[in-house]
Image (cartoon, helix red, strand yellow):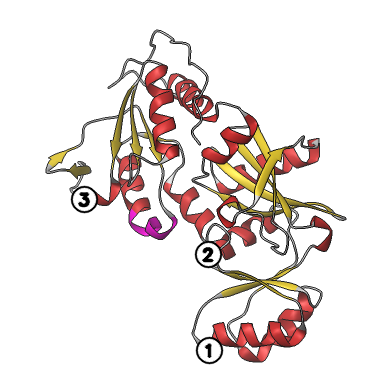
């Protein structure tokens, strides 16, 4: 197959591992900086221009779109879709997952259990917001935050009110969310591919820190998921319209609660902690989907299978 990986930086761990896995399985891999692409909108002939030349056909596209580049990145993904190419995650699924408020609305509508969440842009509604999530302590989240940034724990009513007023005064949109005390600063990352959870880890926060993100200095360990947690992760990815997703959830007295569904989940943490070759499983999933779709051109369609070697993890 011919596979394009849309990534700003070919040296990033996830990009390198996907390229390595694809090449080990006998495929032709091209890394494309989607910010250097532009689209040609012509009736019946959509095209993408890259480095001054129209891009040819690919059997599959793997989008690795940065959160801050969602708008432009999804335009490029959509153009690939209009050109009839298989995308690992579609433009609409990426957009839906990146809009935290919309994502929570959709998940809630489909019966996915979530922490109590409230949203309003009116300063007059602050008391109501705090009441809706069960009072303090509570979590305040920026709608545009990633990797644990823009997430604040307000332990008292006055601190919560002050922070909410400050953000609303700056016209910055936030969510107010229930704080789950019994989670003890830990969460679960479930890596979903298709209709399976292929790997999972438990992330633990440092002492004095309530955020368990590895980018915030947290630690991680292997974890065994319950059947309910697996099913919830798979359903959450499906609801978001994502074939590959990192579903973050926490364990609570009410059962598992979904926090977020990530459309471009990082591979380094999950592969290092679990020892599972997630990159290889992503390429294998693409192979099966291309074959099911009967995609004979422009790649090989059926190719001689090359056994993938175990991943080499870097310190």
Q: Secondary structure at mark 2?
A: loop
Q: Secondary structure at mark 3?
A: strand
The answer to whether residue 138 is above or below residue 185 is below
Instruction: Please tell me how crowded label 1 is: few (under 14), some (14-19), or many (20+) other residues with Cα within 10 Å.
Output: few
Q: Which mark is residue 145?
A: 2
Q: Of marks 3 and 1, which one's residue comes earlier in the chain? A: 3
Question: Where does residue 187 sit, x and y in percent of width and height?
Answer: 71, 51
C-alpha separation, residue under disc 1 versus residue under disc 2: 18 Å
In-front residue for pair 32/298? 32
Question: Where does residue 69 sit, x and y in percent of width and height?
Answer: 37, 57
Q: Of marks 1 and 2, which one's residue comes earlier in the chain? A: 2
Q: Of marks 3 and 2, which one's residue comes earlier in the chain? A: 3
Instruction: Please tell me how crowded label 3 is: few (under 14), some (14-19), or many (20+) other residues with Cα within 10 Å.
Output: some
Q: What residue would you read off at disc 1? A: 169
Split into 4 quadrants, where in the image is the N terminus?
A: top left
Q: Which mark is residue 38?
A: 3
Q: Which residues are magenta?
A: 67-72
């Amino acid at each position: 197959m011919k596979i394009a990986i849309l990534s700003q930086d070919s040296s990033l761990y996830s990009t390198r591992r996907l390229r390595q896995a694809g090449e080990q399985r006998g495929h032709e891999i091209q890394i494309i900086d989607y910010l250097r692409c532009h689209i040609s909108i012509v009736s019946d002939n959509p095209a993408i221009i890259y480095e001054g030349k129209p891009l040819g056909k690919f059997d599959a596209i793997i989008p690795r779109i940065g959160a801050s580049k969602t708008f432009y990145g999804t335009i490029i993904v959509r153009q690939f879709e209009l050109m009839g190419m298989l995308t690992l995650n579609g433009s609409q699924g990426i957009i839906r997952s990146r809009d935290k408020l919309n994502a929570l609305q959709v998940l809630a509508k489909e019966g996915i259990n979530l922490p109590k969440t409230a949203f309003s842009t009116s300063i007059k509604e602050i008391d109501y917001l705090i009441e809706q999530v069960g009072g303090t302590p509570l979590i305040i989240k920026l709608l545009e935050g990633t990797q644990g940034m823009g997430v604040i724990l307000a332990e008292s009513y006055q601190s919560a009110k002050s922070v909410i007023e400050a953000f609303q005064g700056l016209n910055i949109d936030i969510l107010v969310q229930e704080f789950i005390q019994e989670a003890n600063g830990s969460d679960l990352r479930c890596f979903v591919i298709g209709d399976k959870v292929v790997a999972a880890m438990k992330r633990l926060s440092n002492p004095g820190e309530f955020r368990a993100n590895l980018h915030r200095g947290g630690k991680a360990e292997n974890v065994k998921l319950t059947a309910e947690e697996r099913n919830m992760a798979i359903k959450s990815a499906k609801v978001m319209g994502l074939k590959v997703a990192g579903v973050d959830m926490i364990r609570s007295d009410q059962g598992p609660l979904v926090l977020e569904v990530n459309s471009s989940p990082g591979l380094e943490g999950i592969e290092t902690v679990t020892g599972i070759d997630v990159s290889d499983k992503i390429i294998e999933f693409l192979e099966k989907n291309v074959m099911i779709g009967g995609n004979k051109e422009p790649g090989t369609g059926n190719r001689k299978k090359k056994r993938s070697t175990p991943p080499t993890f870097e310190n």
